[in-house]
Amino acid sequence: MPDLIPVAAGVLVPFCRAGVLEAADVHLARLVCRAGGESSPDVELAAALTVRELRLGSVQMDPATIREQVTQQILDPAVMASAGPAELAAATEFGELEWPDPDRWLAELDASPAVAGPMTPPNRRALRLDDGLLHPERYWQDEQQVAALTAALAEDPPAGLDGSAVEAAVRAVDLALAETGTVLDPAQIRASEQACRRRLSILAGGPGTGKTTTVCAILAVLRRALGDPGPVRLAAPSGKAAARLRDAVAEVSVGLPAAIRPPAVEATTVHSLLGSRGPGRGFSHGRHDPLAAGVVIVDEASMLSLPMAARLLEAIGPSTRLVLVGDPGQLVSVDAGSVLTDVVASAADLGPDRLPVTTLTSNHRSGGAIARLAEAVRRGDHEAALDVLEAEDPSVRFVGVDAATVALESLPGVAGQVRSVASRMVEAVDLSDDVTALGLVDEHRLLCAHRQGPYGVEAWSRQLDAALSDVLPGLGRGRWVLGEPVIVNRNMRQLEINNGDCGVVVSQDPVPTVVLPSGSGAARRLPCALVASLRPLQAMTVHKAQGSQFNRVTVVLPPPESPLLTRELIYTAITRARAGLMVVGSRESVVRAVAQPSLRRSGLGRIWNLRTQRGGQIGP
Ligand SMILES: Nc1ncnc2c1ncn2[C@@H]1O[C@H](COP(=O)(O)OP(=O)(O)OP(=O)(O)O)[C@@H](O)[C@H]1O
C-alpha cells in the first residue's frame, strides 16, 4: 500500500500499512479535524476509523471495541490461511500497532473541539460522540430521525378508525381471496389487519411467503374498511423492483371481486416518489410538503439505506399509512444502514405492539430444494445447506471447487444452456418477436460477488462471450451484436427506463436498436444510442441482481477470505433463482458464507430500548 502512505502522517501511517485504513479514510479524517481545530493524532485516528466503519456500512465506531473488531477482520484465520506476502507483511505491521487506551481515548474525544456531544445542537461539528460511540454527524441525525419517526408513526393510531369495520373488511377480503384459491394464512391476515389499524407496519418474509399477495390483501382491506383510503403509492428502492411490485400487485388484484379490487397503480423508485431534485440536491417532498397519499407501500425495504429511510419517513404526513415490505435476510443497502433488519430485530425484543412487524414464514411457492437451501442459509445452518447442495436434486447443483480453478465450459450444462438461450434469442430477433426475446433475457444469469479478478463479473463475462462466439459472433468487441443481452446502468425518468433494466439488441437497421421493458412492462424499441448507459450484459453482481429473479442462476462464490462473502450475499444469490440453481465454490466458501452474517453497527435498537426503559414508550 505504499501509495497511501504519503497522505497519512504520524499515528495513521502504520494503520495504513497494516491495511486498516485507506487513503480516503485518512483524507476525510484530516479535513474533519482541520475544520474542527483539532490536531490530536488520537482524535484523527478515531475520525479515520469512523470513516472506515461508514465505508463498510456502519454508522458508528466504538472506541472500546474497535481494536478487537478490526483484529478479527485483519487476522481472520480464513484470510491468513491463504495470505500472500503482502497480507503477511500487513499482519506483522498490524501486530505492532499502538492503539490508544479506550478510556483515555473517549475522554479526549469528549473534550475535542471537532466532536459534538449528545446535547450539542445539530450541524455544529462533523462528528458526534453519543453514549460512548462516535458517529458522522449526518448519519447520527438520520439515525435519531429514523428512530423517532418510526416510533412516532408506530404509536400513532390512524384517525377515525372503526375497529369492527376493519374486522369485517378482513373477513370479506379473506373470503374473496379464498374463492380465487388463496386461503390467507394467519400471519397474512394479521399483517392485513395491522396495516389497517396502524400508521406504520412492517411485512417481512422470504421469497414466496406471500408478501405481494398480502400487499393486495392490505389494499383491498383498506378499500373495504375505509371506502376511499386516499391515493395509493407503491415504491421500491430500485426501478426494477418497483416494476416487479407493480406487475405482481396487478396480477393478484385481477382475481379479486371488483368491489374490493385495488385500483391499478404505478410503482416508482423511492427517489422518484420523494421528488428527487438530482444527486445531492435533496427531495421536493419532506416534512414541509408530505406525500399526498393515503397509503405508501415500499417493497424490497432491505435495500433502503439509513439516509433514504430518514427522507421517506419525513415525507409521511399525518393522514398517511406506511407499509414497509421486505426480506431481512437479503443484502442490505450499498450505502450505510440496515433499517429493515434493525426494525425486525428490535421488534423481537419490543413486541409487535411497539414495532408492528409481521413475519410470514410459510413458503407458498414451492417446497423445493432452492427454498430448503435458502431456509438453511437464513438459519445459519451450514450443515443443512451442504446437505441440500450435495443431495443432487435436479433443481440444485453444487460444483464444490474453488471457482477460480474452473472454467465455464467445465460447469455441467451451463455453457450449453447459455448457448441454447442465445440461439432462441437469435430466432426471436429474426422473427421480430420482441416479447419472447425480452422474456429470454431473464432465463439464465451468472452472478458473482466480485467485479474484478478470477471470481468477478469481468472475467466470467469474458468466458460467457467466448462460449457464445458461434451463436453471437463479434460479442465483446465494442459493437452491438444482434441478440446481445444488455443492461441499463442509470435511471432515465423521461424515457421511463430504470437502472438495472435488461434488454436485447434486436435490430441494426438503420441504427442499433434495443428492446427494453416499458413503464407498463410491455416491450418497446429504442435506439441504443439514446440509452446512454446501455452496457453489454453477461455476468452480474449479486448486489445488482437484488430485486430481480431469473429462471436459472449460476452463482460464483468468492474465496473464503473474501470480505464480501456473507450470509446475506449467498442468501440473496440463491433466492434470485426460480427453477434451477448452480453454486460454484469450495465447501469452505459455503461454510464461511453461511456462518458469517453481515455485521452493520447501528444504534436504532439501542435508541428504542433506551426510550422504552425511560417511559414505557418508544416514541420521542
Ligand atoms: N395463502 C396463500 N395460499 C396459497 N397460495 C398463496 C398464498 N399466499 C401467496 N400464495 C401464492 O404463492 C406464490 C408466492 O406469493 P407472493 O408472490 O405473494 O410471495 P412473495 O413473498 O411476494 O414472493 P417474492 O418475494 O418471491 O416476490 C404466488 O403464486 C401466490 O399466488
Image: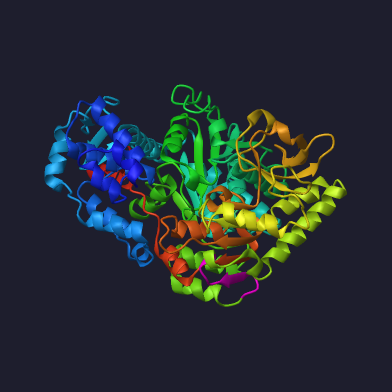
The percent coordinates of residue 194 (x first, y second) are 49, 47
Foreground of the two, 112 or 337: 112
Residue reaching furthest to the top: 288
Q: Is residue 591 above or below residue 103?
A: below
Which residue sits at x=41%, y=41%?
Answer: 154
Q: Is residue 398 magenta?
A: yes
Left or right, 219 with reference to 110: right
Which residue sits at x=80%, y=57%?
Answer: 424
Which residue sits at x=59%, y=58%?
Answer: 208
Dividing the image into four quarters, tell me where ligand 1 lies.
Answer: bottom right
Choose top left, top right, bottom left or bottom right for residue 349. bottom left
Is residue 206 among the parts visible in the rendering?
no
Is residue 269 among the parts visible in the rendering?
yes
The percent coordinates of residue 556 (x first, y second) are 55, 61
Q: Is residue 279 magenta?
A: no
- The residues colored magenta run 393-403
Which residue sits at x=71%, y=45%?
Answer: 503
